[in-house]
Image (tube, grey):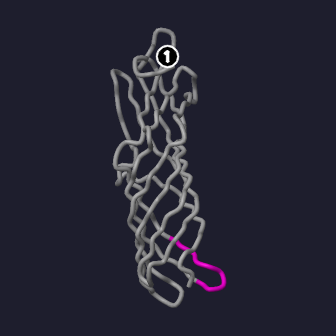
């Protein structure tokens, strides 16, 4: 019956092409690139304030690790390589939650809201096969905002607390950063003008 409760949460992040989650193909001259999001995760704390028996407000602080694979290929130069890198960010969400009681212990709920996200740093990584291929990802200054939506079920007990299982959508309203790949070996020097040493 406490009006304000504290909890911990963990979210596995599974990329979905349906929501255009960073699956990107690009080309420049004979160079071809493919950015693929990989399995990632998020964890943090949740504060929920109960307004009444139907509505609540949630906020908290989350740490998010998003992992990517960037592939480069050039058939003319026999180039085929990739690099893995991760984007670390901190999220402050605020959501409006409503729920209905389905049984003695189970409640169905949905939540909508927004979040402010701050990227921890720019990212630099080398290719897996050669150091001639590398990339630099520049974060968006000041962070970015995203739409949040959740749907799930909550199991509530007086003795052992509450347990939530559900699915979430995190949809940024704008780009969160820009990736600049570079390949430099012998006479091959790709994307030098867009790369800051």
Quarter holding residue 105: bottom right
Quarter holding residue 155: bottom right
**Where's the N terminus, which quadrant?**
bottom right
Give the residue at x 44% y 82%.
52
Q: Position of residue 120 (x, y in %)?
A: 54, 41
Q: Position of residue 121 (x, y in %)?
A: 54, 37
State the predominant SS element of the stretch in magenta: strand
The residue pinned by badge 1 equals 184
> Is 30 drawn above or below residue 85 in the view shown?
above
> Is 104 drawn above or below residue 165 in the view shown?
below
Q: For this rendering, which residue is in front, 110 or 97?
A: 97
Give the residue at x 50% y 39%.
69
Q: Specify few, some or many for label 1: CA neighbours under 10 Å numbering under 14, 14-19, or 20 or more.
A: some
Q: Where is residue 157 in the image (x, y as percent from the top left)?
A: 60, 84
- Quick one: SS at disc 1? strand
> Is 36 drawn above or below residue 125 in the view shown?
below
Asked if the magenta segment contains residue 170, the reply would be: no
Which residue is most to the right? Answer: 159
The span picked out in magenta is 157-165
Q: For this rendering, which residue is in front, 172 or 1?
A: 1
Q: Position of residue 194 (x, y in %)?
A: 40, 22
């Amino acid at each position: 019956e406490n009006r304000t409760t504290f909890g911990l949460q963990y979210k596995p992040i599974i990329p979905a092409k349906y929501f255009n989650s960073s699956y990107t193909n690009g080309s420049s001259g004979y160079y071809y690139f493919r950015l693929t999001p990989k399995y990632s995760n998020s964890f943090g704390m949740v504060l929920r304030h109960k307004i009444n028996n139907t509505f609540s407000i949630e906020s908290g602080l989350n740490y998010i690790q998003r992992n990517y694979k960037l592939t480069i290929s050039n058939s003319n130069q026999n180039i085929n390589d990739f690099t893995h890198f991760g984007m670390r960010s901190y999220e402050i969400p605020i959501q409006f939650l409503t729920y209905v009681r389905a049984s003695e212990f189970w409640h169905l709920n949905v939540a909508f809201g927004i979040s402010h996200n701050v990227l921890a740093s720019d990212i630099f990584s080398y290719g897996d096969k050669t150091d001639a291929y590398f990339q630099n990802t520049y974060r968006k200054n000041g962070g970015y905002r995203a739409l949040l939506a959740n749907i799930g079920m909550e199991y509530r007990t007086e003795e052992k607390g509450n347990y939530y299982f559900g699915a979430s959508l995190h949809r940024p309203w704008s780009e969160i950063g820009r990736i600049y790949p570079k390949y430099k070996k012998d006479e091959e020097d790709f994307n030098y003008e867009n790369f800051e040493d």
